[in-house]
Image (tube, rainbow, N blue to C red):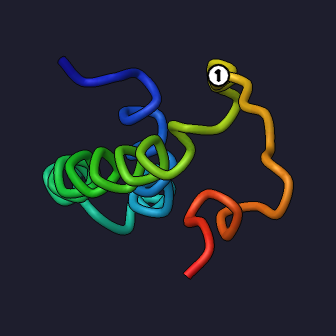
């Protein structure tokens, strides 16, 4: 199902054609074709935007607390 935001964005992208239809420069078939072309383009662009902004605002679960050992990783390896 197409999201309303996709249809609104496609209408916004095809607004110049709609304006030219209102001023009687082009006919309704060209206006509808431009709108139908704008729908999949708007869907792809908004899906990309949703993909990029998907992780924003989510909180990660806290990890397990660990105690640092004196000397860091070198102390665990032992003397050579």
- Looking at the picture, how far across and down is residue 55, in whole percent? 55, 38
Q: Position of residue 32 (x, y in %)?
A: 20, 47
Mark 1 Cα shell of 10 Å, populated few (<14), some (14-19), many (≥20): few
Q: Is residue 35 left or right of residue 48?
A: left
From the top left corner, tell me how far across and down residue 53 is, in percent: 56, 44
Total count of labels: 1
Q: Residue at x 28, y 53 (%)?
A: 44
Q: Is residue 30 above or below residue 65?
A: below
- Residue 58 drawn above or below residue 54: above
Rendered residue at 55%/82% (across/down): 80
For label 1, the SS is loop
Residue at point 45%, 56% (across, down): 13
Quadrant of res 25:
bottom left
Furthest residue to the front? 79
Q: Is 54 or 66 nearer to us in this picture?
A: 66
Which residue is most to the bottom?
80
Q: Position of residue 45 (x, y in %)?
A: 38, 56
Q: Nearer the viewer, residue 21 or 67?
A: 67
Name which quarter of the figure residue 4 lies in.
top left
The residue lying at 70 percent from left, 29 percent from top is: 57
Q: Which image quarter: residue 47?
A: top left
- The quadrant in which the N terminus is found is top left
Residues 40 and 18: in front is 40
Compared to 46, does 77 lie above or below?
below
- Towards the viewer: 17 or 63: 63
Q: Which residue is mark 1?
A: 64
35 horizontally vs 1: left or right: right
């Amino acid at each position: 199902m197409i999201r309303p935001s996709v249809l609104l964005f496609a209408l916004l992208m095809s607004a110049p054609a709609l304006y030219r239809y209102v001023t009687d420069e082009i006919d309704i078939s060209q206006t509808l074709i431009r709108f139908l072309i704008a729908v999949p383009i708007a869907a792809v662009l908004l899906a990309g935007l949703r993909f990029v902004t998907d992780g924003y605002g989510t909180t990660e679960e806290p990890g397990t607390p660990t105690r640092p050992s004196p000397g860091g990783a070198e102390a665990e390896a032992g003397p050579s």
